[in-house]
Amino acid sequence: MSSILSKASQAFSNGRTIVPDRYRNKKFVYLIILLGLTMDNFNVTGALTTSYSIEKYFHASSATASWALSAYALTLGSFIILFGKIGDIIGPHNTYMIGLMVMCFFSLLTAIPQPSIIALIVFRALQGIGGAALMPSGFALAANYFQGAELEWAIRLLSIVLTGSLGLGILLGGVFSVTNIGYQGFFYFTFGLSLTCLVILFFLMIPIEKTDNHKEMKLRDLDYPGVFLLVVGLLLVIFGLTEAGSSWKTPKVYVTIPIGGLLIIFMVCVETLYFRHFKNNNNAASRIVTRAHIDIEDQNKVLDKTESDNGSDQSTIQSYSSMQRDWRVRIQLIFPAEVFKLPNFLFLGIGVFCCLLAYVAFVSALIQYNILLHGNTPLIASVKILPMAVGTVLGSILYRSKYAIRVGIRNTLIFSASLLLGGSIWVSRTDYKVINDYWKFQFASQFIMGFGVNIFFMVYLNAIMSQTPLHLQGVVSGIFQTFGQVGVAIGSALFTTVVGVLVIQTESAAKEEQFKKFRNAYYIGITSAILFIACLFVKDPYRKSKGSAQGADSTSENLDSLQSGDISETNKTNEASDTANKIQA
């Protein structure tokens, strides 16, 4: 068996080297990577509009059918930090391929008719694990592939593809839901698209150029107990939030969420207060040990040579050898100190949380509103959501970091949040009793909301990709996307709680009562937008960085470098500085 696996592994490696490097174009490969990244948004937004087809096929309730989406979001949000960290260690090009392979396989299984909706939900959960490997790796590849003006181009293209696929996923789900093949056709489509990307990238994927910090990271040194606590904690929290849509007064909610939260807090505290403290106390020696990463055989050679040269040096190297064997020095933390020192880390995370919470709350509300109160088909309801997607895509095309710098990054974010809030209030006034209420209250307001959300995400993407060291791109991306997934879970739970059971009402009184519930649901998004604005007036604790020369907003400085084409040094400065410190030590 081992020989068969060895031959298979060798054949796989040989297959990936068939195309010589000189025929591999980085920009073309990146475009295929972006195409593969659309699988995540397709599998989220497409499920919103295929849920009616799933209900019909399995004769299931709306609550049960909703788990086709919730199961995917549950595993995606729980594993995304882990796979981001693994990508930093083994290379994001490898985890991307693994994620795309898993996504492709379970898209096919999801499309094949199943005897029970339980099987469909399980396959969707496993598909979410593929998405968790795919997304942070795609972000990390962009940051590792490009620098300077090319990085800004890559970020703009990333934003266009991701925001565009949100709207396209809703539309495709609506299209397939009205066909005879239903939801299965949608997942056959995602299978075909992911398989195409997988085959192309198998031959053309370009590995990243590893920095010294990349080379120091080993999978065997990962904080596995911390990984277990983090994944279980996130599973419990997101599961509890998902169940909260049915009722907040059940042990599935008020037990799982606190326990999950405590597990996450305990894990972060152990890493921060114990392991990081231990590493800091052994800082100088651990730098040498980590830089050298001497194997046992190499240690023996060094010891033999040193024994004849200098006895004191021998004892020094022996102490380093002993330190290397101490797993507490070598352990790879899920949340290294550099993560929390990123400028505006907390507030960018809150912004991601608020924007996605508002987005999901309004998209869910407007789709259901147009189906139940206007009597639209899922396809027509999907088309009515497109202005929001158009606003986000147009914002990506028009955005230039130099304009944000001129008016100030903070002012740009306030403008973004104001557009989101204004559009939210406008769309909340929609009323099915008013003639042409879609054109009066939904069309333009959705566009404004999408444009406003996009401005934030362009600032956010530029900030984290330009300021994060290359060897931490995956885990940082995973952390921010977890903020977003928690926002999605809370937005969905609050929306379901407010509107209750969704059925088509024929009596005027019942229809009016349902309309009032939808109007109340809009306040979820409005509140989220207000929270977003409020956070922008809170002082960033990391704003005062080392040195008086850095008194200005560090985000603005890095974005200024990005616009001028000098951002290639922004990521590499930390890498070079760390290496220099290790050598000096």
Image: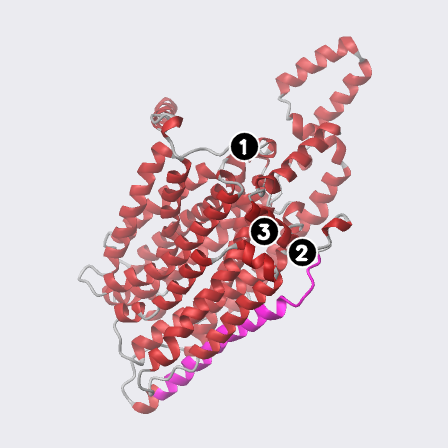
Left or right, residue 280 beside residue 179: right
Q: Are marks 1 and 2 in contact (CB under 8 Å)?
A: no
- The residue at which mark 1 appears reads as 210
Question: Which residue in the rendered view is the most extreme toward the right?
Answer: 312
Q: Which residue is tagged 2? A: 553
Label 3 packing within 10 angstroms: few (<14), some (14-19), many (20+): many
Q: Is residue 397 visible?
A: yes
Q: CA distance from mark 3 to mark 1?
A: 24 Å
Percent x, y for residue 126? 39, 50
| Real-space CA distance between mark 1 and mark 2, rounded to the nearest whole angstrom | 30 Å
Instruction: Pinpoint residue 217: horizontal percent, then vertical percent.
Output: 59, 34
The amino acid type of the residue labelled 2 equals Asp
Relative to the observer, which residue lies in front, 323 or 114?
323
In the image, residue 22 above or below residue 329: above
Residue at x 44%, y 70% (from the top left corner): 448
Residue drawn at the location 52% of the way across and 50% of the way down: 478
Tell me if residue 412 comes above or below residue 377 in the rendering: above
- Marker disc for residue 559: 3
Q: Compare marks 3 and 2 and give the one earlier in the sequence.
A: 2
The quadrant in which residue 522 appears is bottom left
Q: Amino acid at mark 1?
A: Lys
State the residue lying farthest toward the left. Answer: 180
Q: Is residue 241 above or below residue 310?
A: below
The quadrant of the rendering that contains the C terminus is top right
Counting residues from the start of the chain, the first of labels 1 and 2 encountered is: 1
Q: CA distance from mark 3 to mark 2?
A: 10 Å
Dividing the picture into quarters, in which one does residue 182 lie? Answer: bottom left
